[in-house]
Amino acid sequence: MKNEFKKIIISITLLFSFFIPFSTIALTGNTNINLQVTTTPTEPTPSPTPPPGQYVDIIPPVIYSLFISKTTFNSASIEWKTDEPALCQVFWGTTQEYKEGIISGTVFSLSHKTSLINLSAETNYNFKISCKDSKGNESETKNQKFTTLSLPDTTAPNNVSNFEAIPENQQIVLQWQNPADSDFKIVRIIRSEEFYPQNPWEGKLIYESSNSSFVDINLTNGKRYYYTAFSYDFAGNFSSGAVVSAVPIAGEIPPIEEIATEQQCSESGFYWYDNACHIEQQIIPGPPEVEKISLNDFEFIQKGIKLFETEGNIEIQENEPLTILINYEKVPEVLKTIMVTLKKGNKTFSFLLRINQEKTAYLASLVPPTEPGVYPAILSVLDYQSQVLKRIPAQLTVRETKKAFSLISWFAQYYILIILIITLIFVGISYFYIKKFKANAAK
């Protein structure tokens, strides 16, 4: 019995010794057991030695499948994975010092995704990713790079120039000049029998291409048709609209002073009021807020520079697009349309001022006349019944810049000629003295 009990005690001792490493166990020959445990010192080892059969994680997480899933002009989305749950940080900036910011994760995960926002357009950025597992093992990527996109094109092209309508029998011939914008794509012409279409969807589409003329056929003589031409760029932006109206007529249009009836006046494309035929619409006095609008409320801008008017005259440069605008808060709610009409000789060309995307201003961009001179202009304010409430006169003086450039060119040519003459004289004198020196040396 004692031997069996002793065997049991020995077995228990052996089993206990397995769970207490680095121990000395002394056994006596009787049932009294004396256990003496001596623990191995931990210093200078920084971490305890694992028990036999137990694994200690000293391997950092592996970062893989790193890619930039989306880049815009002001943001970037970054995705990556780790081979074990990890907590990650993204360091980013315009240089490899990553001064712009740090994004820290809050959850241990295998799949990771973050977004960098409020970035600058067309800018190179650097970033790196650092990940830690639950044991504190850390790994990081090498420097990574990406470039944000350019700002989206939101600038509308200039309006077509010299948009005119020539009435004929049951048809109207439309002709114009396309804008010179590098990203110009097409012209879209919309027709209405009520008033000038305010946008490319208001009315009937009759033309969409990049030519410079079109014949609108199958029309009714004596009826007025309104047209708006919108120029488009490749980004889908469209201009404020150039407008024109006409009345088809069989035969010649009689002189306005010979027209004596309202029917004949309207059929000839004119306006009847005050028992007489007129070229322009009648002005219906508007509310006080409309009467307050003056030329000083409008801005004229060329090459980003605001031009100032002097006694109703605005001096502009030729061949440079001109933007005319009025702030949104200065336009009463009763208004429907603001138009600018430019007179060139015996012809007039009109353009709509359209509200911009930010709803801060009504504006139109047009190309001034190419010939220097003084051109009368009218800013017309219309209500929702298409009645003219006010006309504001102005004039555009187109300055000639070719002479200035020619003068500069002449000075440049003159300067080059002087330099060439001096060079030839210097070469000639040098040649003479070299030849003379050689002759003296030969003697």
Image (cartoon, rainbow, N blue to C red):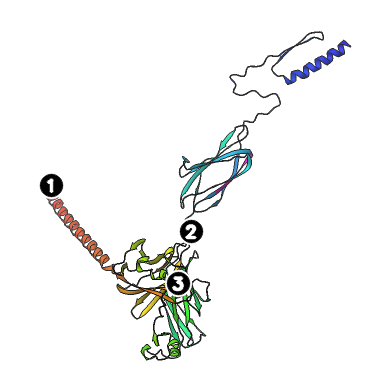
**Residue 161 makes an appearance in the image:** no
Question: Quick check: can you spot residue 74?
Answer: yes
* CA distance separating discs 3 and 1: 92 Å
Residue bearing mark 2:
152
On the image, the x and y values in percent for residue 369 come to 34, 72
Residue 130 in the image: state x and y as whole percent. 55, 38
The answer to the question of whether label 2 and label 1 lie on touching residues, with beta carbons closer than 8 A, is: no
Q: Amino acid at mark 3?
A: Thr
Q: Amino acid at mark 2?
A: Pro
Q: Position of residue 370 (x, y in %)?
A: 33, 72
* Residue under label 3: 337
Res. 107 image quadrant? top right
Left or right: where does residue 333 sit relative to residue 133?
left
Residue at the right extreme of this rendering:
1
What secondary structure is marked by label 2?
A: loop
Which circle's residue, 3 or 2, is located before the other in the chain?
2
Q: What secondary structure is the magenta-colored segment mainly?
A: strand
Q: Residue furthest top?
A: 29
**Where's the N terminus, which quadrant?**
top right
Dot 3: element: strand
Query: How many angstroms separate mark 2 from mark 1 (CA)?
Result: 75 Å
Eye-nearest disc, 3 or 2? 3
Residue 441's disc is 1
Does label 2 or label 1 sit earlier along the sequence?
A: 2
**10 Å crowding of disc 1: few (<14), some (14-19), many (20+):** few
Q: Return the disc, 3 or 1, that comes first in the chain's sequence.
A: 3
**Residue 129 inside the magenta-drawn segment:** no
**Distance from the alpha carbon under mark 3 to that under mark 2:** 28 Å
| Closer-to-camera residue (419/375) | 375
